[in-house]
Amino acid sequence: MLEKNYEVEKEKVLELIEQKKFNQLKEYLGRINGADFPSIFEEIDDEDVLIVFRLLNKEKAAEIFTELDSDLQERLINSFSDVELKNVVDKLFMDDTVDIIEEMPSNVVKRILRTVSDKDRKIINEILNYPDDSAGSIMTTEFIDLKENMTVDEAFEKIKKIGLKKETVYNSYVLDKNRKLLGVIDIKNLLVADRNQKISELMDTNVIKVNTLDDKEDVARIFDKYDYVALPVVDKESRLVGIVTVDDAIDVMKEEASEDFEKMAAITPSEDGYYKTSVLTHAKNRIVWLLFLMFSSIVTGAVITHYEQAFAALPILVSFIPMIMGTGGNCGSQSSTLVIRGIAVDEIKTKDFLKVWWKEIRVAVIVGIIMAIVNCIRILIQYHDLQLGIVVGLTLIVTIMISKSLGSMLPLICKKLKLDPAIMAAPLISTILDTCSVLVFFNIAVAIMHI
């Protein structure tokens, strides 16, 4: 249904442009939700995008501009006159301006910076100097600050005066004369309070805040835990320098999720999307891990070669290798995925190492016994060989226990060593377990069958 809406809106926009009915087009654009424009712009020519942009009011144009693909942003900036560019940049919040500047080539950055004041340019440069993974890099400096001796009436006067230029009006921050953070007050408390009541009587002094150098992923987790709309960012002297808003926290979560998915698929993470990344870059991002995994598999081959006498004596053993290797890899991948997910949402800590292992080993015993019984029955029916059934059954139980143990422990070890747990996902776990499962299989076969 949503795709049909985009298609209808796109066709209507193109029709009005072609008929040069710009007054009707301007009215129609006002009825389209801002979030729908990026999808519409993907389907129309740059010239038509520029026409649409020039018909939008300044606030809506700036709102839409921040959501566009960086390539389209660059093309639009190159098409804008200096006045048009200034109109857009003036309506952007500071964090959005910084995000755009980070994506643009130097010649475009120079044009953008020429449109901002010396004061804003200084703030932009300060934010750009923070590490990429820090809270300071995603904060905005546009927030509402109040004094503790203000009355509610005086607070509302200030909010009315500057609120439209700030990122959010839901929270206001109470500062002392040195801009140290004393407390926070939300708009709901102001609305229901007595007009002559002092801000100091209403503010919440138990403020959860972050430092400019705190990891932005930790900041995103705080939003997830406390359901905040905004979070204050202070420097090492506890002075309020900015706020992080929930939309920026969501962007961090999306970036982290994308990065983890790529690592879990044994791909070097890329900042660009799938289509924007060249074929050569895709190949480069994948080949290192594929080569590593390929050479790791040589170990499995060496183990199989070492036991060639065993399967020469009983060739049927070879037919069970894919099943045992696949089961081990699948079980390990299940455990590692659940543990990585638990680490990502801050449910599992490194101190939970033994607790997680004990839970997974109990799961492994139950799953292993069930799979062993099923396979033993199948082998008895198909091959009428109880000894072979026992070998395969025992192998499955031991392999699954090893798989679940490694799948749960390795991500936590990575976390403890300050590495990304996502690297211990399906491909790497499977490769390790291939070797382990073959070793277990042939050792049990040799011990029980005396071959």
Image (cartoon, rainbow, N blue to C red):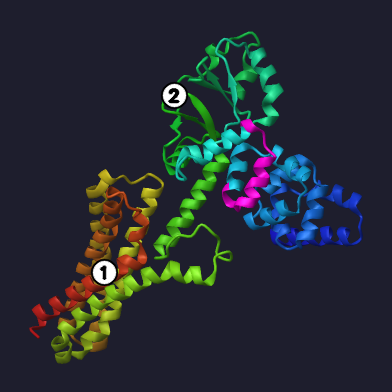
**Foreground of the two, 399 or 201:** 201
Q: Residue at x 46, y 24 (%)?
A: 207
| Residue 316, position as x, y percentages in the image | 22, 88
- Determine the CA span between mark 2 and mark 1: 50 Å
Q: Answer whether labels 2 and 1 touch (C-beta < 8 Å).
A: no
Q: Is residue 155 left or right of residue 363?
A: right
| Amino acid at pointer 2 | Ser
- Which residue is tagged 1? 433
Q: What residue do we see at 60% from left, 51% from top? A: 106
Query: Is residue 306 a member of the stretch shown in magenta?
Result: no
The disc at residue 229 is: none
User: Label 2, on which residue?
Assistant: 238
Q: The disc labelled 1 sits on which kind of residue?
A: Leu
Image x and y of residue 216, in percent: 45, 42
Foreground: 444 or 162? 162
Magenta-drawn segment? 102-119
Sequence-wise, the earlier of marks 2 and 1 is: 2
As displayed, is residue 308 above or below residue 413? below
Query: Which percent across, then down, holds residue 268?
Result: 42, 62
The structure residue drawn at horizontal position 40% and vertical position 71%, both measured from the top left corner, is: 287
Which quadrant would the C terminus be assigned to in this image? bottom left
